[in-house]
Amino acid sequence: MDVPAHRLLLDLLRDEIGLTGTKEGCGTGDCGACTVFLDGKPVNSCLILSGELDGAEIVTIEGLKIGPELHPIQRAFIQDGGAQCGYCTPGMLMMSKALLDENPNPTEEEIRFALSGNLCRCTGYVKIVRAVQDAAAELRRLGADLTPARITSTNMTGSNSWKS
Amino acid sequence: MEELSIVGKPITRVDSKEKVTGEAIYGYDLVLPNMLYGKVVFSTRPHARIKRIHTEKARRYPGVAAVITGKDAPWTHGESVKDKPFLAQDKVRYVGEPVAAVAAEDEDAAQAAAALIEVEYEDLPAYFSPEEACKPGAVSIHQEFGSYRKMEFIVTSPTMPNVCEHFKLRTGEVEKGFRQSDLILEERYSVPIIQHSAMEPHSSHAQVDPETGRVTIWVANDAPFRALHEMAEALRLPKEMIRFVNPLQGGGFGSKGGLKVEPLAVALAYHTKGRPVRVKFNREETFISTLTRHEAVANIKSGVKKDGELLAREMRLFWGAGAYAEKSPTVCIRGSLPAPGPYRIPHVKVDGYAVYTNKPVAGSYRGYGIPQGAWACEQHMDELAKRLGLDPLEFRLKNVYVDGDVSYWGEKLHSVGLKETLLKAAEAIEWGKKISRVEGFKSLRVGKGLACISKPTRTPTTSAAGVLVDSKGEVAVLAGTVEIGQGSNTILSQVAAEELKVPMDKVRMAPLDTDVIPFDASTTSSRSTYHMGNAVRRAAIDAREKLAEMASPMLEARKEDLAFSDGRVFLKDHPQMGIPIGDVIRRKLGTSGVLRGAGSYTYEIGKDLDLETGHSDHASAFYMYATQAAEVAVDEETGRVRLLRMSAAHDVGKAINPLNCVAQIEGGLAMGIGSALHEELVIDEKGKARNPSFLDYHLVTSLDLPKMIPIIVECPEPEGPYGAKGLGEPGLAPTPAAIGNAVADALGIRIYDLPLTPERVYWAIEGKKKSG
C-alpha cells in the first residue's frame, strides 16, 4: 500500500486500512479518542504522520483482545458501565492499558492523571476510573498467567508503504 | 403489583461489547460504496450580502465531481420557522454559515477545491447580544421574517423585529403582590454560549436515486422521524420519498436533532448522479456551524413577606437565538415557563424573548432552557433568604411545590418528589455543619450551596413500538428511540424482557431505519423511558397476550390460567406443565414464523399553553424534580473555585435500571460543573469564535471533578412505565446555581455571570475589597 508521507496515522488507519475502531474526536491532539500504541507507547494518532512510521509497530483497539477473549480492561469497562456513548472508549481503553502496563497498582489519583488527556462527555469519569481499578485488580490476580498482549499489529517497513 | 424480575435491577448495558472492541460503527465511521467526499465553505462574516462566489478554480480541480452554492440548493428548513437555507441565499448571518460545498473523489481533493472558492461580501451591521438586537431601531436580521412559513404558536413582537418568539405568562397581579410584600429584590443574571461537544463530531451521508428521486440519509440524528418531516417539508417531497438510517451516535446532548449536516449532504447528492456523498465536520466546524446553547439574560424581581412567603415574581428573559430560529421558540417557551422556580407564588409575570443575533445558531441543549432560568432563580432565592435571615434550605422547603399544589401555569401537580430531593441532597453534604476555613490553608474559604429545579417534558407526543418473537424464543424490539449513550437500548430491552418474561440475552434492539421502524417523536426532552417505555411495554404485553392465546389449546388450559417465566409459558398451578415460547410459535406459525406485538403511547390529555397567559392544565406528561448541593473551597488569592463534594438527588419516579440512573446523574453533574466553572464559547466583536477547539474550550477532565454523591429518589408517576419519569436532562440543570450559591456562602459575594472562572471570581473579590 502506497501512502503519502503527510497522511495522518489516524486517517491511514480509518480510511485506508478500514480500522474505524480508532476514533476521531478533534484531529488536533486534544481529546485522546484516537489513542493507539506506537512502538508500545500511547500516542494521539491524529498527530503522527505516515512519514514518521518507518518500521514502526502499531497496535489499535482492534488488537486489544487476547485472541478471541476480551482483555480484562475491556471486561471491566462492560461490567462497571465505563462506556456510555462509547466514542471515547477505544482511546480510554488504550490509555488505560498503557497505564496498567507501567503501573499495575495505580491509585485513583494516578488513574485520573493518566486519563486526563482523554476527554469523555458522557460519564463524569467515575465509572471509567472504577473500571480501571477493577481491571488492575483482575490483572494482578491473573498475574503471570496472562499472556502478554501479542496482538494484531500492522508492521511498517520501507518508507511510506504498508504491509499487513 | 406483580414482582419485577428485570425492571429495577442494575443490569449492565446491552451495547457495551461492540463499544469496547471498536466494532461499533458510528455515523462518523460509515463508508458507503462508491461514495464521494464533501467539504463545505463557511462564511467568514457575521452579517453580509454575498456579492459574488468564484467557483471556477474549484470546478477545474482534479477529482471534483460537484461544486454548489445557494442557487443550486434553493431550499430552506427549520423546526418552527422555515428560515434556514441549506446554503446561504444572497446573505450570510453568522460566521460559520455554509456558503458553498464541494464533492470530490477523496478528502484531499475536496479540501483543496473548497480552499479555491472565493466569496465577495458586502458587510451589514451585526448584533452580538440579544439585548442589543432588541433595542429600538435595531435592524432586522431577517427582513423576510414575515414571509417565512412558521408554526402557528409563534408570537412575534410588533416593536422588536429580531424577536422570533415572545412567550408570556400571566398569573395574578404582580404589581399587587409587590405592594403587599415586605421585601422586594431585583437582579440580573447572565449565561454565556456553550457548546455540546459530543465526542463524535457531526457528519451526514446522503444519496439521491437518479431514477426515483428518493432521498436516503445516513446520519446519527436523535430524532430521525422529525428530521424526515423537516427534510420533506424543505424539499417539498412526500414523506415516503425520504428515508433516514441511523448508525450509532457518539453523544449528542441536543446537538444532533433537527437538520445540521444533512442539508449539505443532500444538496450535494442532488448533483452527483446517484453517488452517495459523505460530509464530515471537523471539531472546529462542529463548534461553529452545528448548534450551541442559548446565551441568556434573566432579569428577576421578587416580593416576599418577612416570614419567607413568596408573593410575587416577575422575570424578563432574553434568549440569544443566534442567526436562525432552530428550536429557539420552544426553548424560550419551555425554558421561560418554569423559570420562576418550583415554588408556590400567587402573582407571576414572565416575558421570554427568543432573539436573532449574528452568532452561531442556538438550539436544544440538555436541559432545554432550564439551566439558564435556574442560574438566575436559584441564586436569587439565596439572596432573598440572606436578606430575610432564613436558611436557604428552610426558605425553599417553605415554598416548594408539594402534591396537590396548583402551579402558576395552572396545573394541579402530583408525584412531586422535590422536598425529598432537597432534604437528601442537603443531608449528603452535611448541610447544617458549617466550616468556613481549611486548616493550614489561610486563603481558602469554604461554603455550601444548593439549588433545585423542576423540568417539564415535551407534550403531547407519541411513541410507537413493535416486538417480534421468533421460533427460537428470541425477541427483537422495534423502537425509534436513538441510543445516544443514555442507555435507552438497555432500558427498553429490560422492559421487553420483563413483560415477555424472557432473559435479557434473548432481547435485541432492531437497527433504526425509518422505512421499517414505527414512529417516535424524538429522543429528546428526557421523554424516552416514559413514552417509549410505555409503548414497548404495551407492544410486549400485546405479544404476550397473543402467545397465551396460541399456547392455550397446546396446554389445554384457559388463557387466564397461564403464566410466563424464563422464556416459558406454563400452567400457574402446575409450573412443570409448560413449553418454551419459541416452541409455541414454531408449532403455530412454523420454524420461520414470527409473532408480532404492537403498542403505542400518547399522553392524550396534554394541552398546548395558552398564548396570552401561558397557562395549561396539562402542560407536561410528567415533571422531573432535582436538587443538587455543593461544598466549595474558594482561594481568595487566586479566585479559583475548588469543588470539595457535590450531591445530586433526582426524582426519577422509578429507577428501571439504578446503575444507569447513577451513570446519568454523574454524567450530567460533570457537564453541569463544566458549565459552572469554565465553559464558554467566546465570540469576538467580529462574530468569530475565539476558542472552537478542545485546547481552548475547556471540557471537564478526569482531574476536574469532586467527590460526586448521586442519590435516586423514587416518587412514582402513575402513568409512567412501572412509575418511571425521566432523568437525562436535569443532571446539569441546578449545578451552576448550587455552585454559585456555595461560592457566595464562602465569600459573601454574589457573582451574576457564568462561568465562575478564577479571573471572574478574583475580580469580584477585588471589587468587594475596594467597595469595602
Image: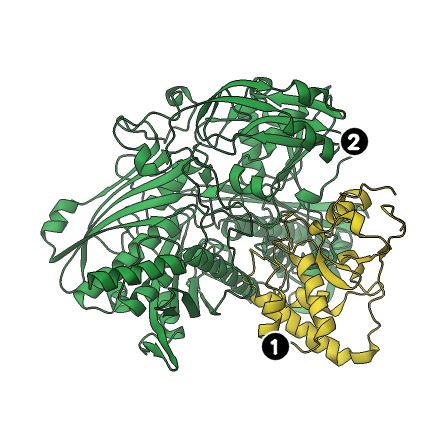
Chain with colour yellow in the figure: A
Q: Secondary structure at mark 1?
A: loop
Report whether mark 2 lies on the same chain as mark 1.
no
Residue B175, relative to residue B213: is it above or below? Answer: below
Residue furthest bottom as drawn: B439
Front residue (pair B51, B534): B51
| Residue type highlighted by circle 1 | Thr
Q: Is residue B417 visible?
A: no
Residue B758 image position (x, y, % from top left):
40, 61
Compared across the picture, whether B714 is left or right of A67 comes to: left
Mark 2 burial class by Cα count in 10 Å: few <14, some 14-19, many 20+: few
Crowd rating for badge 1 (residues with CA inside 10 Å; few <14, some 14–19, many 20+): few
Identify the residue position indicated by label 1 in the image: A107
Pointer 2 residue: B34
What residue sits 69% from the left and 30% below the top? B112
Horizontal side of residue B273 vs B606, given as left or right: right
| Dot 2 amino acid type | Asn
**Chain letter, green:** B
Q: Along the line of sight, which residue is nearer the eye, B412 or B436?
A: B436
Name the chain under label 1.
A
Q: Is residue B117 shown above or below B419?
A: above
Q: Foreground: B169 or A146? A: A146
Residue A136 coordinates in the image, percent (x, y): 69, 75
Q: Mark 2 or mark 1: which is in front? A: 1
Residue sitting nearer the eye, B593 or B733: B733
